[in-house]
């Protein structure tokens, strides 16, 4: 089938689609403009095989619990195309009795429908803002056969968005790092480093708009990621029939080593191998790799892409080409001798102007459009997926052999219950990160410099929040300021990795983390090429420096708030203090009552003793008078 998105002359919006819930057939496409299948009509229910999950993504699971919701989702490219398709869906439900024209298939009390836009540009917030207005107007018609407004939406979006540059003001609309830091606090940095390690990360919360908002806001902290780094993020194969699955297994058998030692599934033995290695060889990233045509089929024959499987199999002969690397840290990574800044100077971060992102060029190895710093990093490539929302029908992707990792969002509890399929589960509601592997927890343990960085962000975000009109509008503590801090953090990390004494400079980021990061795909691709902008970046952690009493307090506070033992101690202390207060009140009341009774008895006794002597004399004269002679 000839894909609709191959014609570069067309606008950024590919299709406007209406998805409804049928009482017998379930979720299905009811309208598409232009038609999803070229030879079919606008009202056809047929879908391209690559987009078979579209109805379940546009109309999310559990949507009947909410009057309206918003979904961001990614679709794989159609055959012959190479780039991800970005979807935004607005869901609403209306009572059937309110409809002016009630069709024959409406048998329930409520009608549930979603209007979604399939686009070639990642303008999530902007598309959502326009789509919400049209969806509201479409439902206000109370006649879903009136589709002229949807065709007008298609024409309007293509005319208004055609030729628009992907700048921050449009791309980041609706994404608030400020709210993210307020909610997750220092854990936002843990999630940031978790994605750098290309682990299997699952976000979980309901409804979907909270889910996709949190996930995409985290990705917006990576410079250039949303603008240019997601084009290969949805290259997966839909679940096929049994016979096709068997053929896939046969084709994978030749690439068994590639699957068994995937970077995302590295165990402790493979990690020990990585610790003893050095900087990755530049040729190991495969300068002969083909840019953006990265499909997830495991290589069953010799091909240009097969050269990149060298780093994915972690062959020791490949890794040892760079010479010896630093040994694993025997002590805490935050050693005083690793900091050389003056103890008297205040630790501040001056974010650099992001001037290099304006001129992007095609990356020779990554295939992504990169700035002069080599960003965005090639994280979401070669089978590492970004799925802001996953339908239950896509559950097989979590264990697919062609998927080496993912950052995905889910609202169905079945995803969260199967913890073995994810390295980390981010529970957005509770701001909690569940990590089962103790080795991974060690890698993500924040160093003292990291804690300073996170504390610096939290303090700037939380202070001066009294003015409701000016809240969040200033530079320091604002959304762009927070993104600038993470950009500086990543620039400094990359610059430190290029230095001769990188072991000393990288110790502030955590030796276990750096060791694991250096065997990831994104680092090897970035390191295999030259990036002129890095010469102007000062190496070393932005918050390196001598220890102080404040660092001890910060570490203690972090440990108490996040470790399981610390939480138990904190809860015990709270329970104890609460019991002491209550007991004190009870004791005070009982002791106070006893004292009152004692005072009453004593006062009575004293009053008895203090009575004058004549008070008892009237009874004495009578016997005296009775015995007179």
Image (cartoon, rainbow, N blue to C red):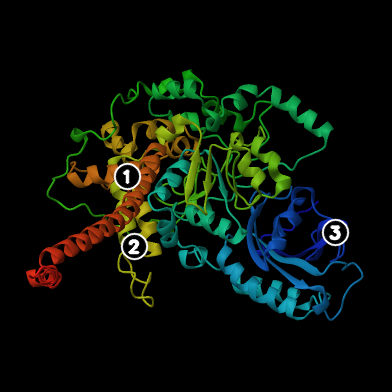
Q: Can residue 235 be seen in this view?
A: no
The earlier-in-sequence mark between 3 and 2 is 3
Q: Depth check: 335 or 375 in front?
A: 335
Q: Could you say which quadrant of the image residue 179 lies in?
A: bottom left
Mark 2: few/some/many CA within 10 Å (<14, 14-19, 20+): some
Q: Is residue 116 left or right of residue 123?
A: right
Q: Which residue of the protein is positioned furthest toward the front in this rendering?
A: 629
Judging by the rendered image, the residue that carries numbered circle 3 is 45
Q: Considering the image in quadrants, where does the C terminus appear? A: bottom left
Q: Residue at x 33, y 60 (%)?
A: 353
Q: Position of residue 490 (x, y in %)?
A: 37, 47
Using the numbered discs, state the Cα–Cα distance from disc 3 to disc 2 in whole angstroms: 50 Å
Task: Provide the secondary structure element on which disc 1 rests.
Answer: helix
Judging by the rendered image, the residue that carries numbered circle 1 is 450
Using the numbered discs, state the Cα–Cα distance from disc 1 to disc 3 in whole angstroms: 52 Å
Residue 478's place in the image compared with 382, above or below, is below
Q: Which label was assigned to residue 407?
A: none
Q: Depth check: 120 or 301 in front?
A: 120
Q: Where is residue 357 in the image (x, y as percent from the top left)?
A: 42, 57
Task: Provide the secondary structure element on which disc 2 rests.
Answer: helix
Residue 540's place in the image compared with 608, above or below, is above
Q: Can residue 54 be seen in this view?
A: yes
Q: Where is residue 38 in the image (x, y as percent from the top left)?
A: 83, 59
Q: Could you say which quadrant of the image residue 112 lies in?
A: bottom right
Judging by the rendered image, the residue that carries numbered circle 2 is 462
Q: Which residue is drawn at 18% across and 33% down?
A: 337
Q: Where is residue 329 in the image (x, y as percent from the top left)?
A: 31, 26
């Amino acid at each position: 089938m000839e894909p609709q998105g191959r014609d570069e002359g067309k606008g950024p919006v590919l299709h406007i689609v209406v998805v409804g819930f049928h009482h017998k057939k379930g979720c299905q496409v009811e309208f598409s403009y232009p038609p999803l299948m070229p030879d079919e009509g606008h009202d056809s229910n047929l879908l391209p095989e690559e987009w078979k999950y579209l109805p379940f993504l546009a109309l999310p699971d559990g949507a009947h619990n909410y009057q309206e919701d918003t979904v961001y989702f990614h679709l794989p490219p159609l055959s012959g195309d190479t780039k991800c398709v970005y979807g935004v869906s607005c869901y609403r439900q209306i009572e059937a009795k309110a409809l002016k024209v009630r069709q024959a298939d409406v048998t329930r009390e409520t009608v549930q429908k979603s209007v979604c836009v399939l686009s070639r540009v990642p303008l999530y917030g902007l598309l959502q803002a326009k789509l919400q207005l049209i969806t509201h107007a479409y439902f206000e018609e109370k006649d879903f056969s009136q589709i002229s407004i949807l065709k007008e939406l298609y024409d309007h979006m293509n005319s208004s968005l055609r030729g628009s540059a992907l700048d921050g003001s449009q791309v980041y609309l609706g994404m608030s790092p400020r709210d993210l830091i307020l909610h997750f606090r220092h854990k936002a940095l843990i999630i940031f480093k978790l994605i750098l390690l290309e682990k299997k990360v699952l976000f979980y919360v309901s409804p979907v708009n909270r889910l996709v908002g949190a996930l995409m806001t985290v990705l917006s902290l990576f410079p250039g990621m949303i603008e240019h780094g997601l084009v290969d993020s949805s290259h997966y194969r839909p679940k096929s029939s049994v016979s096709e699955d068997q053929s896939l297994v046969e084709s994978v058998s030749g690439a068994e080593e590639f699957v068994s030692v995937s970077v995302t599934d590295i165990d402790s033995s493979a990690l020990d191998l990585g610790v003893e290695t050095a900087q990755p060889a530049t040729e190991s990233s495969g300068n002969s790799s083909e840019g953006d045509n990265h499909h997830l089929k495991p290589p069953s024959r010799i091909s240009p892409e097969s050269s990149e499987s060298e780093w994915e199999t972690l062959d020791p002969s490949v890794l040892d080409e760079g010479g010896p690397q630093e040994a694993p840290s025997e002590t805490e990574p935050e050693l005083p001798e690793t900091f050389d800044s003056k103890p008297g100077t205040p630790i501040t971060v001056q974010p650099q102007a992001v001037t290099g992102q304006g001129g992007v060029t095609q990356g020779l190895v990554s295939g992504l459009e990169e700035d002069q710093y080599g960003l965005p990093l090639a994280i979401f490539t070669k089978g590492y997926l970004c799925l802001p929302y996953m339908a239950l029908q896509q559950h097989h992707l979590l264990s697919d052999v062609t998927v080496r990792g993912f950052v995905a969002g889910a609202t169905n509890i079945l995803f969260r219950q199967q913890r073995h399929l994810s390295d980390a589960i981010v529970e957005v509601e509770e701001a909690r990160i569940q990590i089962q592997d103790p080795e991974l927890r060690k890698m993500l343990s924040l160093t003292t410099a990291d804690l300073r960085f996170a504390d610096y962000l939290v303090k700037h975000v939380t202070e001066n929040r009294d003015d409701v009109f000016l809240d969040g509008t200033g530079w320091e503590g604002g959304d762009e300021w927070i993104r600038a801090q993470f950009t500086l953090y990543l620039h400094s990390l990359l610059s430190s990795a290029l230095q001769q004494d990188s072991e000393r400079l990288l110790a502030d980021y955590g030796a276990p983390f750096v060791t694991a990061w250096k065997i990831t795909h994104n680092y090897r691709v970035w390191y295999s090429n030259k990036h002129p902008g890095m010469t102007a970046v000062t190496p070393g952690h932005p918050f390196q420096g001598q220890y102080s009493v404040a660092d001890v307090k910060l570490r203690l506070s972090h440990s108490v708030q996040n470790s399981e033992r610390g939480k138990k101690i904190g809860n015990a202390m709270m329970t104890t203090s609460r019991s002491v207060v209550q007991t004190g009140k009870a004791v005070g009341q009982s002791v106070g009552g006893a004292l009152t009774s004692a005072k009453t008895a004593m006062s009575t006794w004293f009053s008895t003793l203090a009575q004058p002597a004549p008070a008892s004399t009237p009874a004495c004269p009578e016997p005296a008078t009775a015995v007179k002679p």
